[in-house]
Image (cartoon, helix red, strand yellow):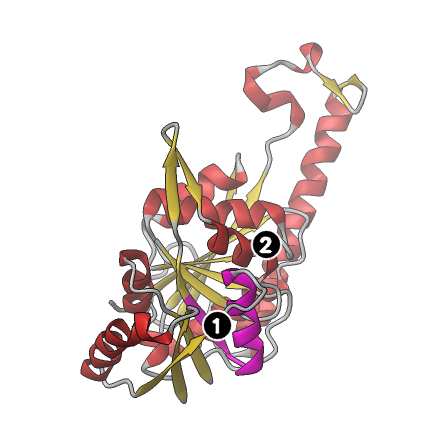
Amino acid sequence: MSIKRILVPFPASVDHTGEIDLALSAAKALGAHVEGLFISQPPPATRGGVSVSEMGYGGRTATAPSINSYAEERDRIARDARERFARACAAVGIPILSTNDEPGTPLAASWREAEGSYVEIAVQRAAAFDLIVAASAAVMESLMAIAEQSLLQTRRPVLLAPSRLQGDLTDSVLIAWDESPECWHAVSAAIPFMQLAKSVRVISVDRDAGNRTASQAEVLAYLRCHGIAATAQVVAPEERSVGETLLAAGAEHEAGLLVMGAYSHSRLREMLLGGATRHILKNAAARPVLLAH
């Protein structure tokens, strides 16, 4: 697959530096369009259709001045976020389009603002994009929720951003390989990044390396067909969980990007993410992680 549209959802009142830097780095490498989606909550008087006279705000009845103050603060935060986004785009030479502009080239950025639930709006919008840039719980809890729901509902790959992007996204790629359909999907989604990478390493977590020999050979052959030369390795978990072992391997090899499948289990008709995936979502603050379901 190609990656030509990247969505970056921004909940209000959050430092978005990590997500912005990662999204623009990916766009620059792939020649893609980036949309910054700023999501604010509606003023208290409009939530659930409740009138001002019926709703308390901060322990007091919401009045017209308090609603106006809320709206002014929300507008200020949105304006500041847009200016930060614009400065980041200018710093890397990516033009920002106005509302009615048609991009002359895929490499461009746009800005959109919406009001409502962070997760619901971001997930609805995600279906129209190739890649979602969000964050792990170590960076921001609401962004992790966006990542989870984008994976489970839209099946779009999610790129988790560290708090600060410290290396080159396409310098070294590490694939957390276990031959599952989700893992194959992640590998396919990451092809555009791996074609630009200086090195690609396939790592499986298993106490018996022989269990992974055939499947690793298969994925290496698949990558070669896409012009990607990769190496393979099996790592024993020792006393660590699979998630801990994968993050440790990423640190050891100084991976610029970790690629893995996002596993889920159906329980009482609710989709729940598996243990290794959830560990990565909660702890991946040091390097970008591409997840696909």
* Identity of the residue drawn at 55% across and 55% down: 279
User: Mark 1 or mark 2, which is nearer to you?
Assistant: 1
Residue 256 highlighted magenta (yes or no): yes
* Identity of the residue drawn at 45% across and 83% down: 172
In this view, the residue farthest toward the left is: 225
**Left or right: 264 with respect to 229?**
right
At label 1, counting other C-alpha atoms closer than 10 Å, the crowd grade (few under 14, some 14-19, many 20 or more) is some
* Residue 17 picture quarter: bottom right
Callout 1: SS: loop
Which of the pair 243/190 is nearer the observer? 243
| Quadrant housing the N terminus | bottom left
Please tell me the numbered disc located at residue 236: 1
**Residue type, numbered disc 1:** Ala
Give the image location of residue 85, x and y in percent: 57, 63
The magenta stretch is 242-259
Which of the pair 121/252 is nearer the observer? 252
Query: In this picture, is 53 found above or below 226?
Result: above
Q: Which of pointers 1 and 2 lies earlier in the amino acid sequence?
A: 1
Callout 2: SS: helix
Residue 267 highlighted magenta (yes or no): no
Please tell me the numbered disc located at residue 282: 2
Give the image location of residue 89, x and y in percent: 53, 71
* Identity of the residue drawn at 75% across and 34% down: 69
Give the image location of residue 233, x and y in percent: 40, 80
Query: In this picture, is 268 found above or below 132?
Result: above
**Left or right: 61 with respect to 98?**
right
* Residue 7 picture quarter: bottom left
Which of the pair 238/18 is nearer the observer? 238
At label 2, counting other C-alpha atoms closer than 10 Å, the crowd grade (few under 14, some 14-19, many 20 or more) is some
Q: How many marks?
A: 2
Give the image location of residue 251, x and y in percent: 58, 77
In this view, the residue farthest toward the top is: 54
